[in-house]
Amino acid sequence: MCLGIPGRIVEVTDAANCLAKVDVSGVQRTISVRLLEKDMPDPDEWVLVHVGFAMAKIDEKEALLTLAAVQQLGVAYTDELEAFKGSPA
């Protein structure tokens, strides 16, 4: 199963190439924010992350509710988080 997981933007690391560092449940990775290029996220904003791409901006309340919901999925959530940990930083 592939999930979109909320992540908080830590910093825009390369605006020209639409890259940002995101924190997902304590794991930080650089992801593409190119799909949000016209509404680039700022640090401390939340995005929905799927396979290394920010798919949409979401507000903090929605992010926290979504995180709580996906954590209830158990193995699917931990598998997705492990995959995120194993992706290139």
Image (tube, rainbow, N blue to C red):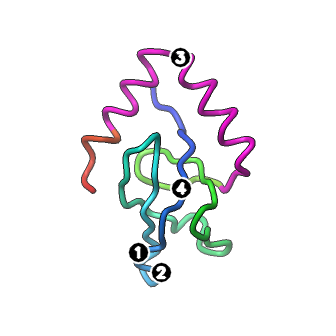
Q: Mark 1, residues whose alpha carbon is within 10 Å: few (<14), some, or many (≥20)?
A: some
**Mark nearer the N terminus (1 vs 4):** 1
Q: In this view, does 36 lie to the left or right of 26?
A: right
Front-most of 38 and 62?
A: 62
Label 3 with label 2: CB-CB less than 8 Å:
no
Mark linked to residue 13: 1
* Earlier residue among tags 4 and 2: 2
**In-front residue for pair 11/38:** 11
Q: What residue occupies the far bottom of the structure in this picture?
A: 16
Badge 1 marks a residue whose secondary structure is strand
Residue with the mark numbered 4: 54
Residue 46 position in % (x across, y down): 62, 54
Residue under numbered circle 3: 73
Query: Measured along the vertical axis of the image, is residue 70 above or below residue 72?
Result: below
Task: Specify the amino acid type for callout 3.
Answer: Leu
Residue at horizontal 44%, vertical 63%?
A: 32
C-alpha span from label 2 to label 1: 6 Å
Task: Give the residues drawn in magenta, as a range.
Answer: 57-83
Q: Where is residue 58 in the image (x, y as percent from the top left)?
A: 70, 51
Q: Please provide percent x and percent y for residue 12.
A: 48, 73
Contact, mark 3 vs mark 1 (Cβ under 8 Å): no
Determine the CA span between mark 3 and mark 4.
21 Å
- Magenta residues, dominant SS class: helix
Q: Which of 12 and 49 is in front in this view?
A: 12
Q: Name the N-terminal-most of marks 3 and 1.
A: 1
Residue 16, relative to residue 74: is it above or below?
below
Give the residue type at disc 4: Ala
Q: In the rendering, which numbered label is found on residue 29? A: none
* Residue behind mark 2: 15
Separation of residues labelled 4 and 2 (CA atoms): 14 Å
Query: How far apart are labels 3 and 1 at the CA level?
Result: 32 Å
